[in-house]
């Protein structure tokens, strides 16, 4: 109303959504919510800091749980830029919808589990080679 805006947009600052909580509960230990990633390059048209819905920091897996607002052209473009930025930092980004988490949680968990296993094996292999 008076021109001041919070440093976040969307759901940030309001806690995690029910689908995010459901997925976090199912994933268990090692996952964190609202993990901050600083953006230093202002030319990327991203906020100064982006927040990952769920993150497994050791393997650099980000899970974005998208609600209905992610269906607009503007949101899809922002999601694309965010994903590209995270990939440039070495993150693996998995996207799923609220509905997928709610209706097909087992399938989402299988996708996350296989990705986590593959990346953990890659980490072990690189540690053994060094």
Image (cartoon, rainbow, N blue to C red):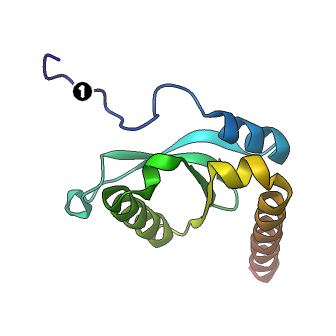
Instruction: Say which of 27 and 77 sits in front.
Output: 77
Residue 56 makes an appearance in the image: no
Quadrant of residue 107 within the rendered picture: bottom right
Farthest residue to the left: give it. 2
**In this picture, is 35 found above or below 64?**
above
**In this picture, is 53 found above or below 73?**
above
Locate the C terminus and report the quarter of the image it occupies: bottom right
Left/right placement of residue 13 relative to residue 105 reads: left
Q: Position of residue 126 (x, y in %)?
A: 74, 78
**In this picture, is 98 found above or below 84?**
above
Q: Position of residue 104 (x, y in %)?
A: 79, 56
Residue found 56% across the figure and 65% down from its top: 91
Residue named by callout 1: 5
Residue 46 makes an appearance in the image: yes
Farthest residue to the top: give it. 2
Residue found 62% across the figure and 39% down from its top: 33
Quadrant of residue 88 within the rendered picture: bottom left
Left/right placement of residue 81 relative to residue 63 reads: left
């Amino acid at each position: 109303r008076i021109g001041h805006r919070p440093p976040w947009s969307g759901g940030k600052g309001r806690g995690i959504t029910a689908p995010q909580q459901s997925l976090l509960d199912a994933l268990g230990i090692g996952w964190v919510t609202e993990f901050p990633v600083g953006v230093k390059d202002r030319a990327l048209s991203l906020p100064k800091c982006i927040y990952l819905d769920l993150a497994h920091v050791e393997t650099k897996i980000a899970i974005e749980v998208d609600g209905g607002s992610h269906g607009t052209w503007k949101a899809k473009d922002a999601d694309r830029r965010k994903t590209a930025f995270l990939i440039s930092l070495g993150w693996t980004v998995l996207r799923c919808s609220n509905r997928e988490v709610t209706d097909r949680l087992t399938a989402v968990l299988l996708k996350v589990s296989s990705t986590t296993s593959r990346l953990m094996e890659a980490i072990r292999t690189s540690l053994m080679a060094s």
